Image: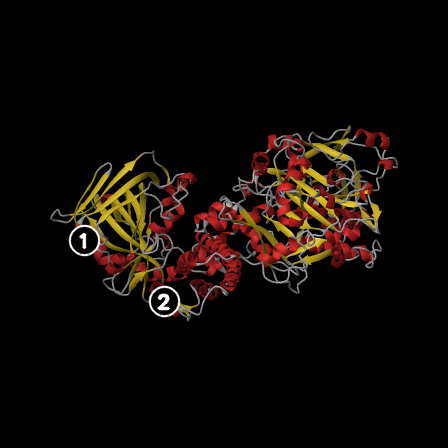
Amino acid sequence: MQTEPQKIAIIGGGVGAVTAAYAITQLPDWQNRYEITFYQLGWRLGGKGASGRNAEEYQRIEEHGLHIWAGFYENGFRLMRDCYETLNKTGLRSPEAPLGTLEKAFKGLNHFLLADEVPQPDGTKALHPWRIDFYPNEEKPGTGGLLPTPFSYFRMLLEAVEGWLGGLLGDAQSELPDRFQAEFRRRGLSVTARSPVHHLHAYARSLDENAFDHTTGQSLHLAALARHAQGWHHDMLAAEGQSDEARRMGYLISLSLAFFRGTIDNGVFRAGFDAIDDWEISAWLLHYGASHDAVYSAVFRGCYDYVFGYPGGLTDDRSVGAGTAIRGLLRLAFTYKGSLFFKMQAGMGDTIFGPYYQVLKSRGVRFRFFNAATNLALSEDRNSIAAIDMVEQAQVVSGTYDPLVDVRDLPCWPSEPLWDQLKDGARLKASGVDFECEKDAPSGRGYRLERGRDFDLVVMGASLGSLHYLTQELAAASTRWKGMLDNVPTVATHAAQFWSTRTPEELGWNALVARHNSGDQHDLQTVITSFVEPLDTWADMSDLLPREDWPENGPTSIAYFCSPAHDAGVDPGPFPDRVRAWADADLTRMWPKARKAGKFDAAILFARDADTPKAKFAGQYFRENFYGSERYVLSVPNSVQYRLPPDGSGFENLYLAGDWTRCGINAGCVEAATISGLVAARGLTGAEIEVVGEGDLAPDAGPTDATKLASPYAQTAPWPLTPMFGTGQIDGWFSFHAVDAKALQAVLPEGMTLHPQALTPEGTHPVAILANQQVGVRASILPRFLGYTDYYEAIIAINYVQVDGHEGVFSYLPNLYLTNNWARLAGVWWYGYNKRMGQLSMGNSSYSVASPDGSPIWSGRYQQKDFARPLTASPEVGMVQSLSEQIVVSEGKFSRWQFSSFDFNLTSAYVAGVSAEITVSDAHLADIPAGRMTARPLAMDRGQTDSSTKLPGAFRIWTSWTLSNPLDSARIARLEAGRTRLP
């Protein structure tokens, strides 16, 4: 039975909205299923990407800011390629026309520059432009494929770091420390290489491509190798000279090594980059050992400039989530096709939104310009959009607005409405009305769209800055929606465009670049960032001159500048005045031959009917983007969780499209908005729509079910062992310490060695100390009254050991002092534990361990400040579990090695953080060096963690425990050999 097509109302006309409509209209039967209508504020599509042609200034292109496509925009290029091919197939545009094909519309760029400011002896800074080149490749953007996994990126960056080191290393070979050599030889890897980075790369290449198949031991080796490489590089930096090349390579390598350490430590290979997005990226890199100079260098400052990553426009306040930043940088550097960047060969409106509009209109999509939404009204049950309140900003004379103008045979959007198509157009123009300004909600003749009559489904394509007035009812009904509005911020931006009669080369720029970079610097096509505010980024856009309509004696170059901005009203004076002051003081450092009498010579600029330098400067284009959809969406730490997915708005007939959604990139760019539009279209239609890169991991990534289900705990032992295991309860103190590694190795039995790890500083190794009272200990099949009488027990555990003949990571207990001889005998004979009788005492804040004759061995003092809380509330719970529940290996009475598993039931344990002080009196009996050790309290919120160590803090614990059946040793060993650390 034929049903009426569903009506789709699309609010807004940015990249996300347009690509959602484009994807829907690519479906073969879409016209039988849907009717699509755009409701657009003002006279043009584009949102933040809208551009216009100024007919009064020779049809010059005027943008919201600087827009350059990256070569990794896989989805964006796929749709644009289809759009241009459709223009050709339908006769809407000839391949011979200006921008007749995708290849004519985009030109590749394979380098960029950074404003490297180098301190001078007199306290000033000298500008040393830093050029970074990338090799072009033969791939075509938009042709599909899978993106690398986080572990693949890890290996790709390692290969790049090896290349950067190539010119800095001599002929000497680096030999691995002894602790790594057994693992390297076992894997058939050489123990000598050009550097520790080469060792790290060789080991990473030897591991399985699927990180879910890495064992815990392999992950620990990788972490320890990364820390070893970082230590080597720090020593190398201290010995390096200060040439530009050495300093710059030092920055890149320092940042990369911190990335290596952090991704391993945070489990990013399996959890994806969102796992670290609660960190700020600079803080994360510093935490994992990047140098301060590297993090605050031009190369890393540029990462913030690229995404306007400064809340409030305050460039001293960096704020980008670590996961979002790392993901974006890796995709940019390692997944580009053809070229690193692509420059559009006309305005963004001309290159992107003009073609999309022409194709969509030809397919039957309706556009209602000058019709702005002001409110989404909910149904009575608050579960769907029941109505949309609208305003008609202006009446179109003919009923249908024709938005494009022809500029040198190219359809373009004008920089202001085509007034002759509007009723009372001349009066409206004279009034100075700005139809796009969202300082206040749009105004005009009000009317309402009703569900069932005017629409069935809604695609919200307006950007986040507009949603505060558009979606007040949604915020009241949905804590998720309110959370998004409250926690995903936006920032104002501003931009300037200069048209000049002098080229950058004539102004001295190329010569300046050549002084600080090798190679030919003639054809620069400059894109540079990390410069001085208020305009930190400059792009040479002179290739657009043929697309504008200049007279014969017109400009010979175009410069676009942009930057984040303070909010409206913060800065004193008009924006052009601030730009003029900046040009006098700073632009002349990039363009030294533009300086005249100590200031910027505005006489080099071009503007219609301008005869004086002042008039020429005033005739340039200046823009401030303060309000609504023109604001840029930020990716601050801990905000990803508040973004809503395009197909999960929480309202049954509402879909979301924009770079403000949770879309896999989660940052402001064309590709993020495109992915969002595609996912919205997929959710709305239920169709199989290709989306590349909406996640970090492959859809089928992960361990097998067998790996997930395999558990070494006592209760999971196979029958007939299942009902028989040890159980009890403890009240005591856990503390964790970094102890001299050589002293610990000396107490290990033959065939056992310390496993490489990166938790504690070089030369030390983790030790866990558990001082407790054992309560109700018994075999599980016995009633409690047949168990042991309660007793004290003090355990020292050396974490992260390895043994000959078995793969895996274990803990070894060099001693366990206790006060119950029956429990001692059971532990010695059944489990091979080094249990010893002693004199133990436990107070409210103290614990002491002595030999049977009363000689002190060690003691502990514990100061508790807070009440007990569930251990699961601590951000350190994962590391506590990792250390306390490692498989225990001992020398068996009836086998070479005996394996057992403790389960401390940590998910229901209660703990209270304590300051711990351990005093070791007898190193021989304690099996750890004599002296005093301290431990901070366990962190119970993120702000309490100690950045100087990754060991968890100390705590008092109340919990139950189980201990595996001694006959289950072989199974536990097999599980540990194949076990991976699950995310």
In which quarter of the view is residue 860 placed? top left
In the displayed structure image, the side of residue 117 where residue 935 appears, left or right: left
Judged by depth in the image, the label closer to the viewer, 2 or 1, is 2
Task: Return the residue found at the far front.
Answer: 597
Residue 154 visible? The answer is yes
User: Could you give the CA–CA distance between mark 2 and mark 1, rounded to whole angstroms?
Assistant: 31 Å
Q: How is the image coloured?
A: secondary structure
Amino acid type shown at disc 2? Gln
Q: Position of residue 152 (x, y in %)?
A: 53, 60
In the displayed structure image, the side of residue 829 where residue 9 appears, left or right: right
Task: Return the residue found at the far left.
Answer: 853
> What is the crowding at mark 2: few (fewer than 14 residues within 10 Å), some, or many (at least 20)?
some
Amino acid type shown at disc 1? Leu
Nearer to me, 380 or 370:
370
* Disc with the residue nearer the chain's start (2 vs 1): 2
Label ID, residue 181: 2
> What is the crowding at mark 1: few (fewer than 14 residues within 10 Å), some, or many (at least 20)?
some
Please give the name of the residue rendered at 38% of the width and 43% of the height, measured from the top-left corner.
946
Q: Position of residue 384 (x, y in %)?
A: 66, 35
Label ID, residue 845: none
Residue 378 visible? The answer is no
Q: Relative to 857, is 141 above or below?
A: below
In the displayed structure image, the side of residue 536 where residue 824 appears, left or right: left
Secondary structure under tag 2 reads helix
Q: Position of residue 591 (x, y in %)?
A: 65, 49
- Give the residue number, with chain letter if any, for mark 1: 925
Q: Position of residue 611 (x, y in %)?
A: 79, 40
Secondary structure under tag 1 reads helix
